[in-house]
Amino acid sequence: MLQQTDNHRQAFDPAVRGYHVVYRENAVNRCPGCGRSHWLIGRLLAECSFCATALPLSESQGSGTVLFRSHGPRGTKLAA
């Protein structure tokens, strides 16, 4: 039998979620998967070059990705 729960939710607070592994620039970053420290750095992620564990960059936190869609110039009809 299902019990009704309280629908009141607290606002999300990232500080209470606990340990969060990120790649930090200007620090020695050990891979949580294999313990090595050789990384391939991208725009949003750092990937361990030995075991391919991916970590988000600490600088990319808070700046999400945006999807842009282009439908061509406005008012221009495309030839079929």
Image (cartoon, rainbow, N blue to C red):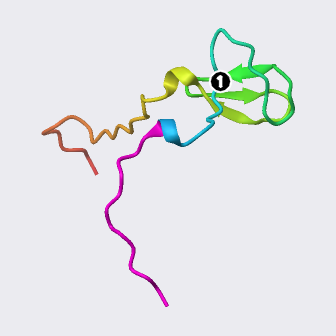
Residue 1's place in the image compared with 20, above or below, is below
Quarter of the image holding residue 77? top left
Quarter of the image holding residue 25? top right
Residue 28's place in the image compared with 20, above or below, is above
Please tell me how crowded label 1 is: few (under 14), some (14-19), or many (20+) other residues with Cα within 10 Å: many
Q: Amino acid under label 1?
A: Tyr
Q: How many marks?
A: 1
Residue 75's place in the image compared with 4, above or below, is above
Q: Does the magenta segment cover residue 13? A: yes
Quarter of the image holding residue 27? top right
Question: Is 11 positioned to the left or the right of 37 in the image?
Answer: left
Residue 42 position, x and y percent, is: 62, 23
Residue 46's place in the image compared with 25, above or below, is below
Along the line of sight, the residue nearer the viewer: 58 or 70: 58
Residue 50 position, x and y percent, is: 86, 29
Residue appearing at x 51%, y 41% in the figure:
16
Residue appearing at x 40%, y 45% in the figure:
12
Q: Does the magenta segment cover residue 30? A: no
Quick one: SS at disc 1?
A: loop
Residue appearing at x 39%, y 73% in the figure:
5
Outermost residue, left direction? 75
Question: Is 67 positioned to the left or the right of 1 in the image?
Answer: left
Residue appearing at x 81%, y 27% in the figure:
49
Q: Magenta span covers which residues?
A: 1-14
Residue 59 position, x and y percent, is: 52, 20
What residue does disc 1 label? 23
